[in-house]
Amino acid sequence: MADQDMKITDKRMFTPEGELREEYRHLEDAPAAPVDEARPAAASGRPESPAPAAEAGAAGASRPEPARPQPPREAPPRATRAIGFEDLVGMLAEQAMVALGVAVVPDAEPMLDLRVAQMYIDMLDVLRVKTAGNLAEGEAAFLEDILYRLRLAYVEKRRVAG
């Protein structure tokens, strides 16, 4: 093991003196994330400045002033209901429809990948087999309907693709 050259790179953002390393200077221009006042500075991931503000005034005169914290963004809305079986089936069916070119992803070219579509249809069929007898009547009918529609779309796309 002594024959191998080993390189150790310090990936920390701050120097031992508390200064931002050169490769992270671009972060000074980015808006700062709000800091929770209830947490200590060490817990927030920001080191406490080792130099008092009076000393920093003379030495840091050429450095730009740090960005002011922006007001917190509004959190994305949470689901108003629990995730259910229909959501799982819908997620898998949506991927199959994208692979069949029936559903289009925004800002993307429509695709036709019959192998991927078949994989998602098969996964839904495995789900149908493994949950047989354990689903509510509506859930079982929903899964059967989705499988029927996906299989029809698959056969049609396969016939057109040749």
Image (cartoon, helix red, strand yellow):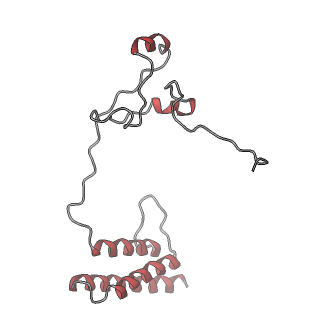
**Residue 116 horizontal side relative to residue 102, left or right:** right
Relative to 11, residue 86 above or below: below
Measuring 33% from the left and 81% from the top, which residue is drawn there?
146
**Residue 148 horizontal side relative to residue 117, left or right:** left
Quarter where residue 150 is shown = bottom left
Residue 148 visible within the image: no
Residue 39 image offset from top left, x and y in percent = 31, 36
Measuring 43% from the left and 30% from the top, which residue is drawn there?
47
Relative to 2, residue 138 above or below: below
Give the number of marks.
0
**Residue 132 horizontal side relative to residue 155, left or right:** left
Residue 94 visible within the image: yes
Residue 149 image offset from top left, x and y in percent = 35, 83
Residue 98 image offset from top left, x and y in percent = 43, 71
Q: Nearer the viewer, residue 144 or 113?
A: 144
Q: Nearer the viewer, residue 67 or 39?
A: 39
For the C terminus, the image quarter is bottom right
Residue 126 image offset from top left, x and y in percent = 40, 84
Measuring 30% from the left and 84% from the top, which residue is drawn there?
145
